[in-house]
Image: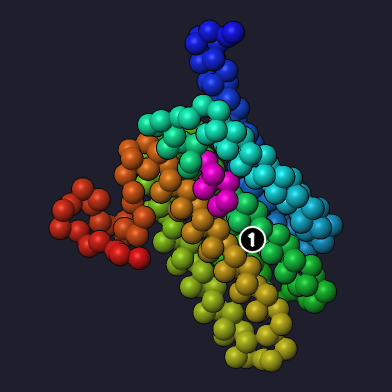
């Protein structure tokens, strides 16, 4: 029979493995965001196709991480902060997988756009992509460091992506009103901007999970200006 010390070491190794695999998955997702935007800017269909294939790695990692979480829950019956961490990983991998899927969606629109002349120089969409990629990197760093304040800053940056999306939408609407020949390309660019805006929303979800993991505080449905400790704040009942 193995003693308690040996069991504890095994348990710590499993938690470390879970954390490391989650970060590897996050790194793959971050690369998918960057590659999808690069494929758009450089009109690189081969890169778009490779990025679509790369999503399969993320899908596989989601399944593996889910399995590892369930195995730890069944074998170790964790409590307190460990239980919170493991159950949150189950949610985090879902958001990461969805971000990767949105990167695939971008690449699919890139392949369609590359059959047509470029509508306009791209300015705000690359800015959105860089912001989303940076938000994801920061929230993963916050996760590793158990830094709730850094996670809050990620949440506060979501409005930057929202504002850029609104700007892109208005500009593309103008192009569509000018000529029916612009509609095909403009609608695909609008879709790409929307995918990036949704990526930012998923990254915000991740930041909220980090705060819950660190502080045990549920900040979902709160605006960035609301103090979660204020007893008079508005509460959503969704």
Q: Which residues are magenta?
A: 89-95
Residue visible at 36% across and 55% down? 220
The quadrant in which residue 158 appears is bottom left
Residue visible at 41% across and 48% down? 208
Q: Is residue 34 visible?
A: no
Q: Position of residue 27 (x, y in %)?
A: 63, 41
Question: Relative to residue 32, is residue 10 drawn left or right?
Answer: left
- Residue located farthest toward the left when viewing the structure as drawn: 232
Determine which residue is flagged by label 1.
102
| Image quadrant where one finds the N terminus | top right
Task: Identify the secondary structure beneath mark 1.
Answer: helix
Residue visible at 52% across and 34% down? 73
Q: Is 201 drawn above or below residue 179 in the view shown?
A: above
Residue visible at 25% across and 56% down? 226
* Dominant secondary structure, magenta: helix
| Image quadrant where one finds the C terminus | bottom left
**Front in this rendered view, residue 65 or 147:** 65
Q: Position of residue 94 (x, y in %)?
A: 57, 51
């Amino acid at each position: 029979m193995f003693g308690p010390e040996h069991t504890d070491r095994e348990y710590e190794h499993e938690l470390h493995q879970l954390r490391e695999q989650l970060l590897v998955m996050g790194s793959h997702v971050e690369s998918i965001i960057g590659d999808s935007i690069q494929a758009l800017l450089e009109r690189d269909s081969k890169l778009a196709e490779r990025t679509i294939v790369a999503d399969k790695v993320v899908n596989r990692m989601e399944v593996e991480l889910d399995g590892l979480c369930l195995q730890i829950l069944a074998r170790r019956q964790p409590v307190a902060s460990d239980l919170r961490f493991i159950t949150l990983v189950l949610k985090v991998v879902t958001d990461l997988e969805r971000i990767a899927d949105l990167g695939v969606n971008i690449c699919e629109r890139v392949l369609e756009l590359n059959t047509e002349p470029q509508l306009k120089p791209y300015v705000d969409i690359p800015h959105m992509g860089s912001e989303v990629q940076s938000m994801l990197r920061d929230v993963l760093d916050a996760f590793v460091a158990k830094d709730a304040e850094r996670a809050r800053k990620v949440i506060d940056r979501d409005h930057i992506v929202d504002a850029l999306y609104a700007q892109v939408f208005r500009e593309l609407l103008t192009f569509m009103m000018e000529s029916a020949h612009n509609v095909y390309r403009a609608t695909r660019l609008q879709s790409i901007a929307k995918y990036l805006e949704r990526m930012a929303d998923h990254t915000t979800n991740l930041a909220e999970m980090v705060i819950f993991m660190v502080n045990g505080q549920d900040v979902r449905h709160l605006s960035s200006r609301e103090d979660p400790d204020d007893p008079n704040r508005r509460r959503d009942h969704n």
